[in-house]
Image (cartoon, rainbow, N blue to C red):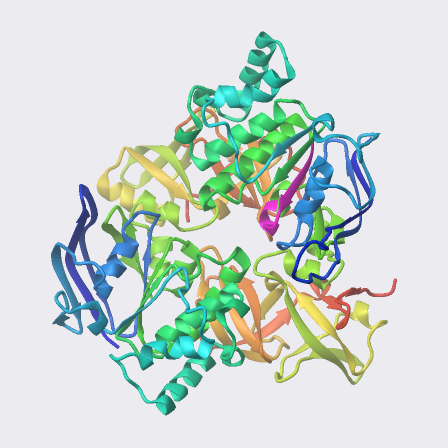
């Protein structure tokens, strides 16, 4: 178990600067999520921690000790990948024992057995130990891969999109299981994902990575409610947050935001107690992109006070609720998404009246 | 008028040539579907359930073992695929790489010998609809997955088919592109109002796109209904657990009678839930069945709640919503709340369920047990 620190890590592949000054401090026993779109450099960070890649600049520390020159086999890190990489000819038991039986860890069989049984219990796969990988479902295979990492009692678990292979349903149930196991692991874990639900659900802290740089580090709530920029805001939440161009007028205590919609202008007063208000006032902004989550957009099919008119672009169910996408005409961010109940009769291209609840 | 009728369709693959002995069962078994003119139906099921086989039989790419298929009023059993007047869009785009987008879209019309200016008119008409107007000169290799799929669909609908068949057209695309494309398909189909059969294993896609969903398992139709029907009123346990994410909580239960009030009880758990009154006519003391309730219909009771206190096993904060898992025996029962309160593992909450959204299923067959009217 260890505290992992990265200081100003840089790594380039040819001309591409994959990591551009990454500094992280992962506390002992923390579940830390690296989150970002494909190609952001998340996996490269893991590889640098594992010692599979050497950074050109910067320091990797485990418990304060500089690890840059320690070879990956001796760093005692356990990696779990998207593909499970199990030995096909070995039973689950032997797969899990393989690392412990190697020269490096030479553990006696009784000890191995004890460890495997402990890990199997946490991963809920006690009944699978005698099976071959070909007799396992994908979810089970991934559990074996994690169990194999677990028995080694590593300094840190590095997990690279371990659930990305699985279909939506299995992924969600595995995520819940992982969350449950996490409490029993008692070990540092660095987890790479591009799925915001995984990041939110699992991470004690989340680092948002974009183009080799850290955009924001915080807890799930901090990142969801106080995203530091548009990029972060759009990554979190499904359906994604609406971003609207606004022109700010007024001064002092009375600020108002105006949106150009369908050629006309809609103005909202910004409530003084809202977070947006303080930010705009402090920076004396004249223009701002205001983000508003779909659940804070209200609609009506009749004209109403404080509502503006737009056109329905589409209406689709996303399970327990639906999303209406409306068209605001010829503006930069022309689509506005909002949450609606299932089973409405909404025809595309019909009129809809919308109100934004800016106070959130 | 019916757009498409499947009447008692069977399909059995001939496995006699294979060395390995395969169970010679039906891939599709007694399938009956009627799809109205202009309707969008989804064939939904896990992989290997026979949905693609069904689609291929409609297209004429697969022989029918038994039964009849009508497109409109025409019996098409013995009709060649090219004479069935259908448009196909599959998961792989299969475009002609040496032709540009325009050429690909126009290809079928050219093959049919449609006049050049007529082709041009139709390509130009369909391009803005599929938002490929500025891609027409590009070669297929230059296109993104989403663009390729748009070209692919344009190519299918330019022939003005009586019937449009799509097989997992979105499964190649990543999350965001898929969502955006789903919206586009929905809009497009709404505009052209072509009878469409859409194969998918993604329940969300089926729910959001289709007018009606046919849920298939092991080649047998489980339920055919609107998204709301299959979601709120599932015919059996399979449909209930397949539709919705996270899936419906389905728990084995024994019903007990406490002074005239019935309760669901669960093995290795002290959880007790009152049985909705409407089921009183079908249950009795010691009655065993399965109870199903969706995670959104499990609620956290307030201070004065009568619910049994339970310990939280998992708490996931997903931003938009929060999911809580509770152990009921060896099953993790999920509930979803939009409540802003943050819980943690080990907290005690009282559980309540929405009685009107509680379903009963037969333990053996999985069929719905319905209240007597």
Q: Is residue B233 visible?
A: yes
How many numbered marks are there?
0
Q: Residue at x 29, y 54 (%)?
A: A42
* Residue B112 image offset from top left, x and y in percent: 65, 17
Above or below B44: residue B330: below
Q: Is residue B147 magenta?
A: no
* Residue A314 image offset from top left, x and y in percent: 57, 35
Above or below A13: residue B130: above
Q: Residue at x 58, y 8 (%)?
A: B117
Q: Give the side of residue B213 with respect to residue B121, left or right.
A: right
* Residue A136 image offset from top left, x and y in percent: 53, 69
Residue A113 found in image quarter? bottom left
Residue A264 found in image quarter? top left
Q: Give the side of residue A127 with respect to residue A231, left or right.
A: right
Front one among B119 and A311? B119
Front one among B340 and A60? A60
The extreme right residue here reads B373
Considering the image in quadrants, where does the N terminus of chain B appear? top right
* Residue B242 image offset from top left, x and y in percent: 64, 58
Above or below A237: residue B105: above
Considering the image in quadrants, where does the C terminus of chain B appear? bottom right
The extreme bottom residue here reads A110
Q: Is residue A308 visible?
A: no
Region in magenta: B195-205
């Amino acid at each position: 178990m260890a505290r992992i620190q990265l200081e100003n890590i840089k790594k380039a592949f040819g001309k591409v600067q994959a990591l551009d000054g990454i500094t992280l401090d992962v506390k002992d026993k923390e579940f830390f999520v690296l989150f970002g779109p494909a190609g952001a450099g998340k996996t490269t960070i893991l590889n640098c921690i594992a010692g599979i890649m050497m950074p050109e600049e910067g320091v990797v520390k485990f418990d304060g000790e500089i690890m840059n020159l320690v070879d990956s086999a001796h760093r005692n890190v356990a990696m779990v990948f998207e593909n499970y990489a199990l030995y096909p000819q070995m039973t689950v038991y032997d797969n899990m024992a393989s690392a412990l039986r190697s020269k490096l860890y030479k553990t006696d069989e009784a000890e191995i057995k004890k460890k495997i049984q402990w890990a199997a219990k946490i991963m809920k796969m006690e009944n699978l130990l005698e099976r071959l990988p070909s007799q396992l479902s994908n979810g089970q295979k991934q559990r074996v891969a994690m169990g194999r990492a677990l028995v080694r009692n590593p300094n840190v678990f590095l997990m690279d999109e371990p659930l990305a292979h699985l279909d939506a349903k299995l992924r969600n149930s595995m995520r819940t299981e992982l969350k449950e196991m996490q409490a029993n692991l008692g070990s540092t874990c660095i987890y790479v994902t591009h799925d915001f639900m995984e990041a939110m659900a699992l991470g004690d802290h989340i680092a948002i990575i974009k183009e080799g740089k850290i955009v924001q580090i915080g807890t799930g709530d901090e990142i969801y409610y106080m995203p530091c920029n548009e990029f972060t805001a759009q990554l979190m939440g499904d359906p994604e947050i609406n971003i609207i161009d606004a022109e700010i007028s007024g001064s002092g205590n009375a600020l108002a935001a105006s949106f150009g919609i369908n050629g006309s202008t809609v103005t909202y007063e910004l409530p003084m107690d809202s977070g947006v208000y303080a930010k705009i006032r402090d920076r004396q902004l004249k223009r701002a992109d205001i983000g508003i989550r779909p659940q804070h957009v209200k609609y009506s099919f009749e004209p109403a006070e404080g509502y503006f008119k737009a056109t329905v672009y589409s209406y689709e169910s996303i399970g327990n609720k639906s999303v209406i996408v409306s068209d605001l005409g010829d503006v930069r961010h022309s689509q506005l998404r909002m949450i609606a109940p299932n089973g409405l009769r909404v025809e595309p291209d019909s009129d809809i009246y919308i109100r934004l609840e800016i106070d959130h | 008028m019916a757009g498409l009728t499947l009447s008692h369709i069977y399909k059995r693959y001939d496995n006699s040539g294979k060395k390995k002995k395969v169970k010679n069962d039906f891939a599709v078994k007694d399938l009956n579907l009627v799809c109205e003119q202009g309707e969008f139906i989804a064939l939904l099921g896990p992989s290997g359930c026979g949905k693609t086989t069904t689609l291929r039989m409609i297209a004429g790419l697969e022989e029918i073992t038994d039964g009849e298929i009508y497109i409109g009023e025409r019996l098409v059993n013995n009709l060649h695929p090219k004479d069935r007047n259908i448009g196909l869009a599959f998961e792989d785009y299969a475009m002609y790489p040496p032709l540009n987008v325009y050429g690909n879209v126009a290809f079928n019309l050219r093959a049919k010998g449609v006049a050049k200016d007529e082709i041009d008119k139709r390509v130009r008409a369909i391009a803005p609809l599929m938002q490929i107007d500025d891609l027409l000169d590009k070669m297929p290799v230059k296109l993104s997955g989403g663009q390729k799929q748009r070209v692919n669909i344009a190519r299918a609908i330019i022939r003005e088919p009586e019937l449009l068949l799509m097989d997992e057209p979105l499964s190649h695309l990543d999350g965001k592109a898929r969502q955006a494309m789903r919206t586009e398909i929905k809009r497009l189909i709404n505009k052209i109002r072509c009878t469409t059969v859409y194969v998918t294993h993604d329940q969300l896609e089926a729910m959001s796109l289709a007018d009606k969903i046919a849920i298939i398992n092991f080649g047998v139709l489980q339920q055919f209904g609107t998204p709301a029907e299959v979601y709120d009123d599932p015919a059996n346990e399979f449909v209930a657990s397949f539709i919705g994410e996270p899936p419906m909580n389905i728990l084995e239960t024994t019903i007990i009678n406490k002074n005239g009030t019935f309760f669901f009880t669960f093995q290795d758990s002290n959880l007790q839930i009152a049985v909705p009154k409407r089921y009183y006519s079908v249950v009795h003391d010691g009655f065993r069945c399965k109870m199903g309730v969706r995670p959104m219909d499990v609620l956290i009771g307030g201070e004065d709640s009568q619910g049994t206190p339970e310990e939280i096993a998992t708490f996931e904060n997903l931003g938009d919503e929060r999911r809580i898992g509770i152990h009921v025996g060896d099953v993790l029962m999920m509930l979803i709340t939009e409540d802003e309160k943050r819980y943690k593992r080990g907290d005690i909450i009282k559980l309540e369920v929405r009685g009107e959204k509680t379903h009963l299923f037969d333990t053996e067959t999985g069929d719905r047990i319905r209240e007597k009217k």
